[in-house]
Image (spheres, rainbow, N blue to C red):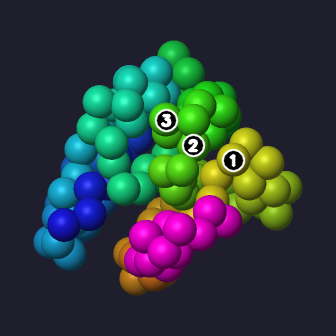
Amino acid sequence: MPKILLVEDNEMNRDMLSRRLERKGYVVVMAMDGESGVAMAYSEAPDLILMDMSLPILDGWEATQRLKGDAVTQSIPVIALTAHAMSSDRDKALEAGCNDYDTKPVELPRLLSKIEALLNNFSKGETS
């Protein structure tokens, strides 16, 4: 079962999304801020990270840049989750190193298709 690290500071979003992902067969581990998310990426070695961009302590932009800048974690696919739906926000997420981008509120079927596509691509050795 693929392991997903959900980095989300909003308890209601974290609870709802983690339960829905677990029902789909994913193992979900959670962090509540960017700093904890970076640490858990090392300790948990997730198959994929869902990264809220508006996080306390260390925002999702900086957390993703740190993960993508380290050989140990750079190959973990990251999907940015944000309430900002402007095309410039999508571009900023991709520039920070995110592999994909999705808006809140999360539409689960759309997010699942992005998760599955990235997991399939990365399991085949593709990195973008």
Q: Main secondary structure of the magenta part?
A: helix
> Against 73, is 108 above or below?
below
Return the residue nearer the eye: 62 or 127: 127
* Residue that extends furthest to the right in the rendered view of this protein: 88
Q: Are marks 2 and 3 in contact (CB under 8 Å)?
A: yes
The residue that mark 1 highlights is 97
Q: Which mark is nearer the camera, 2 or 1?
A: 2
On the image, the x and y values in percent for residue 4 come to: 32, 54
Q: Residue at x 66, y 33 (%)?
A: 69
Amino acid type assigned to the residue bearing label 3 in the image: Val
Q: Is residue 63 magenta?
A: no
| Residue 72, label in figure | 3
Tell me how far mark 1 sits from mark 3, CA to CA.
15 Å
Helix, strand or loop under label 2: loop
| Residue 6, label in figure | none
Helix, strand or loop under label 3: loop
Helix, strand or loop under label 1: loop
Residues shaded magenta: 114-128
Q: Are marks 2 and 1 in contact (CB under 8 Å)?
A: yes
The residue that mark 2 highlights is 74
Amino acid type assigned to the residue bearing label 1 in the image: Gly
On the image, the x and y values in percent for residue 5 come to: 34, 47
Q: Is residue 124 magenta?
A: yes
